[in-house]
Amino acid sequence: MTIGRRSSKGTPELDLREDKSVSRKHAKIWEEEGEYWIEDLGSRLGTWVNGLRRTKIKVKFGDRITVGKTMLQLLPSNVGELSEE
């Protein structure tokens, strides 16, 4: 899933257009072999995970991801999965 702001070249899957500090192509998050990853796509302000600036890192349920001034949290679709981690 791409994270960013809508532009004339397209709309990211997670459109944070209200936050002007988010780059148009800010980051991407994906699942690979049961693990989740996030990668900054060269954004101006960076991508932060649990308060630390990261370019590419494995993330887990409950991690706090900050892009621009927006804080996101990776959560499972089934809240019961949080206690299994």
Image: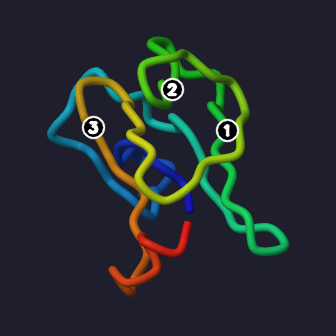
Q: Are marks 2 and 3 in contact (CB under 8 Å)?
A: no
- Badge 1 is on which residue? 39
Disc number for residue 50: none
Residue 59, position as x, y percentages in the image: 61, 48
Of residues 28 and 11, the one nearer the viewer is 28
Q: CA distance from mark 1 to mark 2?
A: 8 Å
Residue 37 as seen in the image, left or right of residue 77: right
Q: Dot 1: what SS? A: strand
Residue bearing the label numbered 3? 71
Coordinates of residue 85 in the picture (x, y in percent):
56, 66
| Residue at point 23%, 43% (across, down) | 17
Q: Name the side, left or right, on which 55 lies relative to 28.
A: right
Type of amino acid under label 1: Glu
Name the outermost residue toward the front: 83
Mark 1 touches mark 2? (CB < 8 Å): yes
Rendered residue at 32%/54% (across/down)? 15
Q: Nearer the viewer, residue 65 or 83?
A: 83
